[in-house]
Amino acid sequence: MRKRTTLLVLSATAVALSLAHAADPSSDPYGLWKPLQGAIYKVHSGIISDRTPPTTRDRKLTVLVDGKTAKEIFDSIGPDLPETCSGEQGDRTRDKKGIHCSYTAQDKGTKDGPYRCWIGLDLRTGDSVGTVSC
């Protein structure tokens, strides 16, 4: 039993150190890793607007990103859809499977900016899932 506990502690320490190293952008020789700022997430059941807590059979993760990170994602998943949810002139929408991004012209001068992206994953299957709708 003592041997098993020691092995478990050593394994957990190795994983923690690996994750700490991976989270350090200075260890990335190509400079591709960036801190994720302006993001919040929710683990839930059903659709994102439901207030349903996750269950053992239905666990989804939705990440909401805004600011520069959302702009980078938005720019990467073009082209624009022909229509937006708002119908407002200047607004733009882009979708790719479980990623939905929007540009809201009215929010151009706000702190969070005009770009916002929702990324959805089914935590049970690993599949991407739709996150928001009009």
Image (spheres, helix red, strand yellow):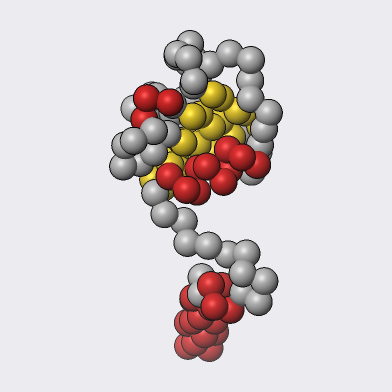
Task: Tell me, yes or no, if residue 91 can be seen here.
Answer: yes
Q: Quadrant of residue 48?
A: top left
The residue under the point 54% across, 24% down is: 92
Residue 11: where, in percent of width, then height?
A: 55, 80
Question: Percent from the top left, x then y, of residue 126?
Answer: 64, 43
Q: For the point 53% across and 72% down, which residue is it?
A: 25
How many marks do you count on the picture?
Answer: 0
Q: Residue furthest top?
A: 87
Give left or right: position of 96 versus 14.
right
Across and down, in percent, residue 15 comes to: 54, 75
Up/down of 17 relative to 79, above or below = below
Q: Is residue 131 visible?
A: no
- From this view, report whether residue 113 is shown above or below residue 21: above
Instruction: Name the foreground residue: 62 vs 107.
Output: 107
Where does the image place residue 38, in percent across and percent down from the top left?
A: 39, 49
Q: Which residue is at 54% across, 78% downward? A: 26
- Left or right placement of residue 102 versus residue 75 in this view: left
Q: Residue at x 54, y 38 (%)?
A: 119
